[in-house]
Structure formats: structure tokens, C-alpha cells
Amino acid sequence: MQHTSTTPSLSDRLDISSIPNAVNVVNTTTNAPNTANAVVKTSNQLNIFDVLTNGAHPVRQNGEAGYRFVVRSPQATALTLCLFDAADNESQYAMQRHGDNWHIWVAGVRCGQRYGFRAEGQTSCTQPFNHQKLLLDPYAKGVVGQPCLKTDDDLAYFCLDDSRDNAHRAPKSQIVDEHFDWGDDQAPRTPWSQTVIYELHVKGFSQRHPELSPAVAGTYAALAEPAIIGYLQDLGITAVELLPIAYGIDEPHLQRQGLSNYWNYNVLSPFAVDARYATGQTGSSPLSEFKSAVKALHAAGIEVILDVVFNHTAEAEQHHPTYSYRGLANADFYWLNDDGSCVNHTGCGNTLNASHPATAQWIVDCLSYWVEACHVDGFRFDLGAVLGREPNFNRHAALFEKIASTPALAGIKWIVEPWDIGAGGYQLGNFPSAFAEWNDRFRDDMRQFFVCQDGNLGAFATRLAGSSDCFQASGRPPHSSINLITAHDGFTLADLVRYNDKHNLANGEDNRDGHNNNYSDNHGVEGECNDEAIIAARSHTQRALLSALLLANGTPMLLAGDEMGHSQGGNNNAYCQDNADTWLDWQRVDADLFAFTRALIATRHRIASLHRDAWWRDSHITWLKPDASAMQTSDWHSQNDGCKAMQIVIDDVCLLQINGKRQAQTFQCPDGEWLDAQQRRIQGLITQQHLSITLYMRN
């Protein structure tokens, strides 16, 4: 379908007026009543003081309000700005080249205006062009519409070798109202040494909360509700890490099955707040609701960390649908092979080229926007090794240097998933000192010690002490290790002790997706059961793992719902399950498990060696055998003798007794008198009846 080119009416957000000194005038017809032959004022003129900032920005010219649109497309021979009115009528305006950028100013444009670009040029294997395809602004602060990709014909509309116009189907960039009253908002600036991270999904966390109205549940607004804030404060966490909230789309194979990308890692527009998590209520917007949530969380002393995706975009492989980047600057945004195909270090079809100066600037501009406009406190980078590829990983990569030298980004938290799937992609411990890293070795070693009962005391102690083997040699402190037992990707804690195998049939991939090696154990029965002995054994393992997580040196990250006993029915890759399987069930909270977790977090804050952010030394830590004698070198490798147990005295005030097996273990307490959780005095011999980490404080 071809769209006729008409000028929008007064009611459609464009000021229609006379045009003295206008440079570029188009379309002298209009749909507005009683405005025959009216025209829209535009200009491509620049003066020496103008700075071309990518995106759409309010600019006054000769005293008149309007917006300047700037987009980068170095190989294009022509760029067209397309504005859409409320009836989806399109008006086109030729843009002017300035270096690698194209720009135009349009009078009367206001918040809410939808727009896009069309690019023309000489197609090559590395840079395709198709003027019939509407392209999103890479700097768009808002996006409306979701592409329908259910059939082959739907897909073809977004492919650059298709000759049909797709504006009627394409998502469109939107100018958003960025004004917000932050009042006296102050960032908590929680020191790393006191940080406890809570990873949550905006929708799944609150969708089923009984105290929230249906209109608010599952939205940004829910995060500002007293019931939610009170819960987070009661639990004792200091930061929420939100799964991606930037505008994303659902992949074709999911749409065809009636599924959606629930985790939202298929990001298309990283500047834009995704409207699917907004209430849609009059007087609010996705952006304003998110800002209100940040403000409320800050007032409660809770930091907001965003999970961001700068390893790939939703455009997937070379000949797959194009929505923006490929149609504007393909070889700048993506790593390409000589034949123009995409390098795939992500498993998602393409890999962003963060080493290109323009792409690096786009990433830094995006991060700066979230910090400056939305007051976020940090970022977690998905498949973060991509950020350092040049094309091999370089811990001194230009992007890292650019981030470090950007004033707006000073003092915030940086977290990275330190790998991708390409050659040389596993980079745990190799990132710049400003970054903390998800520590999969902590996860796996702790699971193997407690769930699989491998008895490797050396590996257990190394992880508990902060993973010095990964971080200390490069001069990095213990907080660099983001310790985790579970995360969104994989089994929940409850499922880790209920299932030997993944159960992912609902994902529509014949159970092929998801990890096969989970270091899990069902304790005798697969899934739910009524056997009290099995239920008790599972409970002991959960508590031992939570204790290891929250009493270890480093930065703990707790998956939302693990403190409740949340299960996903054995699905260890629930990325496309936007339903009751993934939404937390607030009516079935394990109150005892919650209280146990809350007490662990509170205890953590009382132990000096856990909030000093320093490597453990013999002056603060004593490693003991069960009989209270000092651990010897041979004891660290004695997993085959069946002991699987040890004691640790921290700061001479805290005693941990670790039993790594499901049978009873007797300990000789170190000299002195100790208090258990019920303030009962403990000394001499004591038997721990099951798998556990038991904590005592010196009396």
C-alpha cells in the first residue's frame, strides 16, 4: 500500500502557517478544515552555534517552536522525514546532509508526534537501502505499535528486498513529554559493600499481588505502591535489577505460536520505555510512570538498576526484517562478514559493533539518557563480552574508556554478564575495574557443593571468600563478584531442588531449549510431591544455598520469588511464558522461607567482613575442621573422605558451621559461648542433623 503525502492538520500536532524565509516547503494540500493551500514551515538551515544532536529535540528558530530531527546514515544519498497524523496519513520532508548526519527542523511539532525515516542509496552487500521501508529513529524516546510477524507475508513487509511500502505496518518513533517533577529525589548511592540486589520482572513481580488494583498490577506504577515498597524494605534488599524495560518486539516464531518474549531481551529501541508495562491511564505515560517508580524507590532507599541489551538488536540475521539500524548504517551498527552476513556472537542472529565510534557514542548517549532523564542507578549488560570486542575481547576497549570518561555516568553501578557465545567470549574476571561481574563459577560451585554434595571444600571456601581466583590478581575488590544461585535464566531455587530435568515443552521447541546441565536434584521425586521427608530435604537445601549466597564475600543477587518458594514447574527457560507459570503467586508465599531470607540479609549487614569490601585475611577469618582444629592443606581436597564439613569464624564474632551432606554432622564449637538464632547459648559438641549452613554469634 502506498501512502499519499499530505500535510497534517492543526488538530494533528503540526502548526500550519505562512512561511517567510522557509527553506524547504512541501505539500500544499491539507486535510484540515478551512485551511486550503496551507503549508508547513520547515528548515534545513544551520548557524554556527547549532549542534546536531541525534534524535528529535525541541528547537526554536526565529522565535518559533518546533523540533529538529537528526539521524545518521553515512552511505545514504537521500533521507526523508515522515510524519504521521492521528489517521496515519503520512507527510514527507526531504532532509539535508551534514557530514554523516541528516537533519531537518519542522515548526509546530509537539509531544505525541509519530515519525520515522526513509533512506535511499546505492545498495551493496554491506549496506542495503529501500525507500519503501519506514525506519525507526535509533534515538527514539518513544515507540508505538508492534510489528505483526505471524506469516511469511508479514515478515516480507519488513525485508529490504521487498518492494511494498510498509508504513501502515511498521512501528513508529514518537516524541514523548520528558517533563517530570523530581522534587528532592536523591540517589541512594548505596556502597557496593552494602548492596543486596534483587532481580525482578516488572510485570511478573506484581501481576498477581492481591493488594493492587488490576489496572496497576504488573506495571511500573506498581513498583511505587506502598505494598510493594514495604515488601522490599521488609526483605532488606538495597537495589532492584529490572529485566529489560526498553521497547522490544516478539520474534516471529513466538508470534506464530501465540507466545511472547516475556523477558524482553529482543530489544529494538533501547532509549524508549516499553509501553507494555504501563497502566495506559489518562494523564500518565510509560516514561512518567517509570520515573515515578524510580522516585518512590529512591525515597525508600532502594536503587534501580536496568538490565540493558547492547549485544544485538531485534533485526536478527542479514535477510530478516529490518526496522531501523540495518537500513541506516548496517556496517556501523553490526559486525559483518565479508559477504555482508552478520557475525553471530549472541545466538540472536547479529552482534552489535560497539567498537565503531558512532555505535559506541549511541550506547553512551543511551546510558546517559537513562541516568540523567530517569535517575537510574546502574546497568547490567546482557552478554557483556560483546561490549569489549574489537573484534576480539579487549578489557581496554574504546567503549569502556568512553564510559569511564563520560561525566554523566560517574558514580553509578556497572554490572556485566561476562561472556558471549563467540570464540573467546568467556571473560569472567577480565573486565575493567569499574564493572562487577555475574559469577557463574559461584553459582555452579555452590550448587555442586550443596545440591550435588560433591564435598569440594576448597571450591566452596574460594567462592564463599569472594572468588579471589577470579578478581584479586587484577587488583579488584570482592564486590566485583556478583554472587548468584539462580537468575531469570534457569531454574528458580524451588525448581532447583524439585527437578532433575528441564520441563520446557510449553516453549514450543520440543524441550530442546534451555540448559541441560543444571546441577539440580529432585531429592527423590520429580516435581511436586507430598512426601514429608522429601519436602524437608528440599527445604534444607534451599536454605543452605540461600545462606551461602547471603553470607558470602562479594555482592549477592537474589532472584525475585526465591524467598517465597516460587516455582515455574521445571521450566528453566521461561523467556516466553507470560502467564501464571512465571508471575509470582503472592497467595502461596512460604512465610518461613521469607523470614529465613530476611534474617540472613539482616545478619549480613551486621558482619564487618561482609561489608568492608576487602579480601579475607587470617586476622579476620579462621578456617576450622569439624573438631575445631585448624584446616590443613590436605583438608581442602578431602572430599572423598565423606566429611564434607567445616567451620568458619568471622571477625571472632560469627561462627558458621557448614554441613555439605544430607546426614548428621557433629561439630566441636570453638572456645567460648555462642548464641543461636533463638538466642540460646551453645558450646561444646553440637550436631547439625542435615545439609546446612548454621550461623551463631559470639555471646
Image (cartoon, helix red, strand yellow):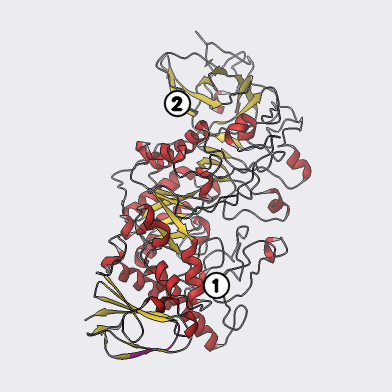
620 horizontally vs 226: left or right: left
405 horizontally vs 218: left or right: left
Residue 71, image x and y in percent? 54, 27
Of the pair 190 and 289, the residue shown nearer to us: 190
Q: Is residue 273 visible?
A: no
- Quarter of the image for the N terminus: give it: top right
Of the pair 456 and 531, the residue shown nearer to us: 456
The earlier-in-sequence mark between 1 and 2 is 2
Where disc 2 sits, the SS reads strand
Q: Amino acid at mark 1?
A: Leu
Q: How many marks?
A: 2
Residue 687, image x and y in percent? 37, 90
Q: Is residue 360 visible?
A: yes
Q: Nearer the viewer, mark 1 or mark 2?
A: 1
Q: Is residue 79 part of the magenta span, yes or no?
A: no
Q: Which residue is mark 2?
A: 58
Please give the name of the residue rendered at 62% of the width and 64% of the height, measured from the top-left corner.
515
Vertical comparison of 58 with 604: above or below: above
- Quarter of the image for the C terminus: give it: bottom left
Highlighted magenta segment, given as a residue range: 686-691
Residue 656, image x and y in percent? 34, 78
Where disc 1 sits, the SS reads helix
Q: Which residue is mark 1?
A: 496
Q: State which quadrant residue 400 falls in.
A: top left
45 horizontally vs 88: left or right: left
Please give the name of the residue rendered at 54% of the width and 31% of the height, measured from the top-left corner.
113
Residue 348, image x and y in percent? 64, 48
Circle 2: is it few (<14), some (14-19), or many (20+) Cα within 10 Å?
some
Q: Amino acid at mark 2?
A: Pro
